Image (cartoon, rainbow, N blue to C red):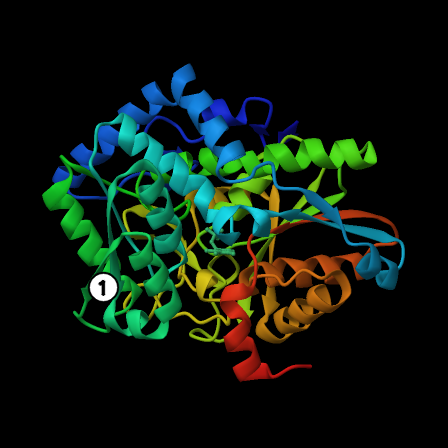
C-alpha cells in the first residue's frame, strides 16, 4: 500500500535509514563518546536480533514469563450503549507488571545479557519504566540503577518500594527541580562513565538511534498479535485503531501491525486542561521541529526554544515531544493525531470500569475516550483500542481528586 509516496509494503526495510532517520526526524545527536556506545548497541542489535537463539529465547520469555499473547476483548455493553459500532480492546493491562512497558524492557535486558553487560541503567519519572526495567533485571540477574528525581521519589512511593523489592538501586537526583529532566541528565552522565559494563535502557520510542527503532521492534508484538486475534474473532480487519501517545511506544508497536492495511489509525495526545502552553502535552498537535534528548522530532518549546513545561493528568503522557517515527507518520498523514482532555479521560476511566469491569491506566483511558468519541461519529464498523495498562497505580489519585462517581 502506498501513502504519499511512501511504500508500506517495504516500509520496515526502509525506515529508519541506516543513520536512524524517519524522513527528516530521528538521528543521533549525542557527544562523540556516547555515539561510540550507541554504535556498539546498534551493531549488537542488528547481529543479535537475527540470531535464532535470541529470537526463540524472547519468544519463550513472552509466553512463559509475561503471559503473552494478551487477549483482545470485545466491549459488549459499551458498544451496545453507543449504537452500531463495535469496540474492542487489546489487553496490555494483562501483560506481566500491568502494562506494555515490559515488552521492550525484556528485549533490552536480553540484549544487555547477550552483549555481556552486567548492569542496566535508566531514568524514571512516575516510576513505571523503572519498575518494568527492575523486573527485567531481576529476571536476568543484572544489576539495575534507576535514576529518579528527589521530588518524584517522594510522590511515587509505591513504585519506589517496588523497584527496591525487585533489587534495583534507586539513585536520588537532587539537582535543579529534581524531577524527570534532571534524572535523564544524571542517567546519561552515569552511562558515559559506565558504558563498558552497562547498557542504557530507554523507556519509549525516543532518544538517539537505535532506540526508536529497537523499542518499536520489541513493541511490535502488540500489533502483530492484535491483528491476528482480531481477524480470528471477526474475519475482518478493524475499520479504525486507536492508541495513546506519550513518547509513543505502545502506539508505535500497535500501529506497526496495521500500517500496510486499509485501516484508519489514530494517535491520541493529552490535552490536559486546555490548549494553552503549559496546560497540555500534545506535542504533535501544537509543537514544532526541534532537537532534544539526542533526537530530532516535533516538540513543545518555551520562548527560548528549550523543552516547554507540560501537563497531563496521566504522568506517563507528560513528555514535551514524541518519537521521531510519530513525527514522520504525522507529516505523511498515515496516522491521524488528535487530543483528549483530562475530563473526557476521567469519564472514560469510569465508563470502562463500570460497564466492562476493566480499570484502565489513566494513560490508556485517553485512547478509550477517543474510541468512544469516534464510535459516536461512525454509523457502523469497528474500532480496536490499545489498552496500554491497568489502573491500579491510579486509583488512590482518582479517588482523592475526583471521588467515586
Ligand atoms: C508509560 C505509559 C504510557 C506512555 O508511554 P508510550 O511510550 O507513549 O506508550 C502509556 N500507557 C501506560 C499504561 C504507560 O505506563
Left or right placement of residue 316 versus residue 116 in this view: right
User: How many residues crowd around disc 1 within 10 Å: few (fewer than 14), some, or many (20 or more)?
Assistant: many
> Farthest left residue?
193
Residue under label 1, please give it: 182
Q: Secondary structure at mark 1?
A: helix
Q: Position of residue 18 (x, y in %)?
A: 34, 26
In the image, 285 versus 228, the foreground residue is 228
Question: Does the image show residue 306?
Answer: no
Q: Residue at x 50, y 47 (%)?
A: 96
The answer as to whether callout 1 falls within 8 Å of ligand 1 is: no
Q: Residue at x 42, y 31 (%)?
A: 16
What is the quadrant of the C terminus in the image? bottom right
Left or right placement of residue 316 versus residue 344 in this view: left
In the image, 356 versus 255, the foreground residue is 356
Q: Position of residue 57 (x, y in %)?
A: 43, 25
Q: Position of residue 172 (x, y in %)?
A: 20, 65
What is the quadrant of the N terminus in the image? top right
Question: Does the image show residue 379?
Answer: yes
Up/down of 115 relative to 134, above or below? above
Up/down of 294 relative to 343, above or below? above
Amino acid at each position: 500500500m502506498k501513502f504519499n509516496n511512501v511504500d508500506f509494503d517495504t516500509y520496515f526495510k526502509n525506515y529508519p535509514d541506516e543513520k536512524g532517520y524517519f524522513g527528516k526526524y530521528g538521528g543521533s545527536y549525542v557527544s562523540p563518546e556516547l555515539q561510540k556506545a550507541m554504535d556498539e548497541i546498534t551493531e549488537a542489535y542488528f547481529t543479535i536480533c537475527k540470531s535464532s537463539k535470541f529470537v526463540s529465547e524472547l519468544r519463550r520469555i513472552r509466553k512463559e514469563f509475561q503471559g503473552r499473547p494478551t487477549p483482545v476483548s470485545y466491549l459488549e455493553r459499551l458498544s451496545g450503549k453507543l449504537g452500531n459500532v463495535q469496540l474492542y480492546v487489546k489487553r496490555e493491562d494483562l501483560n506481566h507488571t500491568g502494562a506494555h512497558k515490559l515488552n521492550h524492557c525484556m528485549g533490552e535486558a536480553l540484549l544487555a545479557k547477550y552483549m555481556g553487560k552486567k548492569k542496566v541503567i535508566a531514568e524514571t519519572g512516575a516510576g513505571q519504566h523503572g519498575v518494568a526495567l527492575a523486573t527485567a533485571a531481576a529476571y536476568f540477574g543484572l544489576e539495575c540503577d534507576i535514576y529518579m528525581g528527589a521530588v518524584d521519589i517522594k510522590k511515587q512511593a509505591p513504585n519506589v518500594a517496588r523497584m527496591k523489592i525487585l533489587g534495583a538501586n534507586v539513585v536520588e537526583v537532587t539537582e535543579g527541580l529534581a524531577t524527570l529532566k534532571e534524572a535523564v541528565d544524571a542517567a546519561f552522565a552515569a552511562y558515559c562513565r559506565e558504558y563498558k559494563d552497562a547498557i542504557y535502557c530507554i523507556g519509549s520510542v525516543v532518544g538517539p538511534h537505535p532506540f526508536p527503532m529497537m523499542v518499536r521492534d520489541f513493541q511490535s508484538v502488540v500489533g502483530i498479535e492484535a491483528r491476528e486475534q482480531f481477524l480470528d474473532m471477526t474475519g475482518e480487519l478493524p475499520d479504525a485503531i486507536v492508541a495513546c501517545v506519550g513518547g509513543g511506544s505502545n502506539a508505535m508497536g500497535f500501529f506497526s501491525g496495521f500500517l500496510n492495511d486499509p485501516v484508519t489509525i489514530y494517535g491520541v495526545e493529552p490535552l490536559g486542561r486546555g490548549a494553552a502552553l503549559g496546560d497540555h502535552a500534545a506535542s504533535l498537535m501544537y509543537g514544532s521541529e526541534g532537537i532534544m534528548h539526542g533526537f530530532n522530532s516535533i516538540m513543545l518549546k518555551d520562548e527560548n526554544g528549550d523543552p516547554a513545561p507540560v501537563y497531563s493528568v496521566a504522568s506517563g503522557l507528560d513528555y514535551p515531544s514524541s518519537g521521531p517515527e510519530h513525527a514522520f507518520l504525522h507529516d505523511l498523514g498515515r496516522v491521524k493525531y488528535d487530543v483528549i482532555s483530562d475530563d473526557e479521560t476521567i469519564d472514560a476511566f469510569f465508563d470502562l470500569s463500570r460497564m466492562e469491569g476493566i480499570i484502565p491506566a489513566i494513560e490508556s483511558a485517553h485512547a478509550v475516550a477517543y474510541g468512544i468519541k469516534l464510535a459516536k461519529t461512525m454509523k457502523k464498523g469497528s474500532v480496536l483500542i490499545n489498552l496500554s495498562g491497568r489502573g491500579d497505580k491510579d486509583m488512590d489519585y482518582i479517588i482523592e481528586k475526583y471521588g467515586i462517581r
